[in-house]
Every structure is written in structure tokens, then in C-alpha cells.
Amino acid sequence: MCVCVSVSVCVKSREKRRTEQQRTPAKTDILPDMDLGAMKKISSMFSTLQEKLHRTKCSSSDPGVYPAAAPPAGRECNHMGQLFFEYLLVVSLRKKRNEEGYEPHITYQFPKREVMGRLQREEEEKCMKAAHLFCFPEGINWAPLTEYKSETFSFVLTEVDGSRRNGYCRRLLPAGRGARVPEAYCIISRVACFGLFSKIFDEVEKRRQISKAMIYPFMQSLREAPLPSPGNTISISSFIPDAGTEIICLTRPVESWLEHVDFRALFRCLNDDEVLMVFAATVMERRIIFISEELSTLSQVLHAVAALLYPFVWQHTFISIVPTVLIDVCSAPTPYLLGVQKSLLEQLTDHSDLMIVDLSPGAETKFITRIGDEESLLPAKLTEELLLRLSARKRNASTEELNCLVSEAFLCVFTRSVGHFSQHIRRSGNSRHFHKKSFLKAVEHKSHLNFVKLFIQTQMFDLFIQEEETQPNPNAFFHRKVSEYHERTKKEKMKAGWVRGVVV
């Protein structure tokens, strides 16, 4: 049997800052970007969380106390220089002592802590103490179950230094009789590819139904396999009792920047007009909270919304699933994209200057609250073109086809409104500088001007321009699309001129 899946790498983060503007873009699920007072509040909250984690830490003889960090540089890397994943964690629920409810704890990790060096163990404790909390963000509210539909979701762990890891989680009900609590399998990886790890979890869950011991040889084979270059495929052999040796093919697409995204969840929850309102609010870097009971819906929709911004990157707080213990982050005064379970909705008391989007099926209104100007933020002509392009998608389209159509549609917003930016980055001595005034004067359609004036004030545009000023052609795909648009426009103008000449 051959299971073909795809891999992607995450869009690189922008880490350059304009010191004269004193902007500090957030790059983390953990440390939001906000003013000093808010930062102190959140820092205090996380300090409390870390103290709690230390107090509840298991004995040092337990190899699965904390999730593990990346191998030190030069250690345990394949010949391609990057691992498929760093760690597999098994997170279980256990009853709290002398209290009601359950708490998550790590019962197994692969590779085990005892095979790590001292520096690696220190890195593990420093970077990834809270991973198991994201596997069960609901907190203590659990009860034994006889039925539970397995679900897959993702989160991001990022440290202050900008190092980033993706957490992929599959929660399932262990095989057995009677009521029991779910357990979670969590893969920590620097590779951003939800589709890939969802397929890998299918293999993990299949082996878990046979025996937990069947999981680890498969994961070891995957860990030792080289991450393929774009367009290439690798094959992994895995033995299953009574089924023989299985060959699993892992293919990385040529265009991999969208492989962490599946737009189907977004358009299943919201209609086209609602997606455009969310997009407009996101482009203007507002505070947006998404509500759903399903963790998989939250993580998929938030990553899809962030992907609509390409080639720009969301620079503020991004938490696809907010654990109960971190719900106070919703009161932060600065921009964010947050996913919150619907059971926590009553705890969101501050609805001012905020968009709350209900992703629940059959919700009476998709927008519990919003500013009210979202329908007018995008230029009317761009809105019409977006809706026309989105209407062309097919019901039976594959994930790749849908991703391509949707990303191309939203990319047009930026090619048409700010795609001429490169003509206004000019060299002066050994450096290059963006000339904002000439850029604004050259906006092709005056109906776009108000939108462009607002958009160039965002951190995502600011960081994008800084990257363009300092690196040679860092956004090649976008440059190519802009060139194609300008060439097409030039031909259309020439054709229109020829037609007018014939008519005259």
C-alpha cells in the first residue's frame, strides 16, 4: 500500500525591526506583541503558569515529564540537515490528587530523555514545558467516555529568540472496554505541514489499535528519513503483523508554501462575503477571536486566515487554540488572531474594538461582535473581483486545487494595490530605501488609495518592505505574479488602443 502525502516548510518569519519606530513584531504563540503594560500582564501570567508547571513536575526518574527540544546543532540530523520531526509525545489525563477533574501529563516521549545530553535536556525544559497543555487546552473538565471521535489539530511553540516549533496533535480514545479518558499523540517539528502530519497520525492511530509498541518503530523510520527537497518523494518501510511490510510514500510538492493550509474548513464555516470581512479585518491588523467547539476547526481556520495574507505575514499574537489557563490573553489591547473554544465564550467580557467569529454549524450569526466597517475596507472593484474568482471553485476540487484558486484570488488584492512597490525601492550607496511618497502617487487606481494608505501603516507591510530593502528578491513568487499582472495589463491596453484605432 502506498499513502502519498505532502510536506511544506513554514513561511520564514520577518525578524528585522525598525528601531526608530520601536516596533517589535510578535512571533509566538507564547509571547504576544503589545505595549509595556500589557506585556507585563501577560509575562506575569506566563510566569505563574511556569511556576505551576514546576510545582506539579513529576519525579526526575520519569522520562516523560516535559516535551523535548530540538537536538543540538550537528547532532542527530539526517544528511539533508533537517528532521521530519523532533519528538513524539504521548499525553494522558490523570485524576488530580485531592481535587476534582483531570490534568494532562506526558507518559512517554520518543526519543527518551535518558538518551539526551545535559544541554539538550536543559533546552527541553526551557523551551517546551507547556506543550502538553496545548494537547488538552480544556483544562480539568474531563470525564471518562465510551465514545470519542478522534481529532487532529495544531499549535505553535515559539521562544523569545524567535525559534519556532509546530505541535501536531491527534487525540483519540485508547482501545479497551468501558469508560476511559482520551489520550493525545503529539509530534513536535520545525516543519510546517498539517496535511503531512495528519496522514502520519492516520498511520499512528492504525498501529495504536494493534499495540502501542507498534508506533515507535514506524516513528523511528520516519525520524531517520531525510526531508525531501521540493518535488521529490521518499519511501518508508514499516512492518505490521498480519499485514506484512507497508511502503509509505511521502511527496513534497514543488510549491510548498500552502501545504500547511486547507481552505476547505474556512469556506465550510463561512460564506464568501463573511470570509472577505474576516480578511479585511486581518489585513488591518485588528483583534479577532474565532469560536468553535472543535479544536481541528479552530487550528485549520486560523492557519487558513493567516495564509490569505501571503506574501505578507501576520506579525502579532497568533494562538490557534487558547488553553483555558491562558484565557486572559484575550484582554490584550494589541492585534491578535486567537482560537477559543465555545465553552469559554462567557469569559470574554470585553467586546470593544473586537471581532468575534462563531464557526459553529448553524450559528444564528457568524459575527458575535465586530467594528462594523469591514465591508467597506476593501476597494469595491477588488471585492467584486475576489467574489468572482471565488465563485469559480468546484465542489469536488482537491485540496491542492482549492488552495491554488483561493490563494491566487487573494493574492490579486496585493498585486493590484501594492504590487508596484519594487519600482520605488531605490539604491543609495550600499543600501536600498523605499520611497513612500512616490509609491503612493503611483497607485494605479485612485479608488485603491484609501486602502493602500491604511495598509502601508501595518507591521506586516513594514516588515515586508524591510526584507525587500535588505535581501535580494526575498519574495520571488510574489514578484513573478506582479510581473505577470503588469505584462497582462500592458497587453490589454495595447489591444484596447488597437481596437480604438480600427474603430476610428
Image: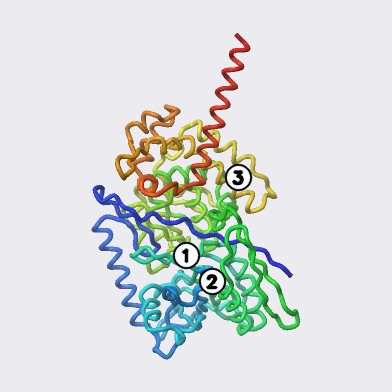
x, y percentage for residue 126?
A: 35, 75
The answer for how far apart the CA atoms under marks 1 and 3 are is 26 Å
The residue to which callout 2 is attached is 79
Q: CA distance from mark 2 to mark 1?
A: 28 Å
Amino acid marked by disc 1: Phe
Are discs 1 and 3 less than 8 Å apart at CB?
Answer: no
On the picture, is 304 further left or further right than 202? left
Instruction: Look at label 2 and name its amino acid.
Output: His
Judge whether residue 441 can be spotted in this image. Answer: yes
- Point 64% across, 40% down: residue: 392
Q: Nearer the viewer, residue 320 or 93?
A: 320
Q: Earlier in the sequence, mark 3 or mark 2?
A: 2
- The answer to whether residue 361 shows anywhere in this view is no
> Which residue is labeled 1 in the image?
155
Mark 3 lies on residue: 405
Q: Nearer the viewer, mark 2 or mark 1?
A: 2
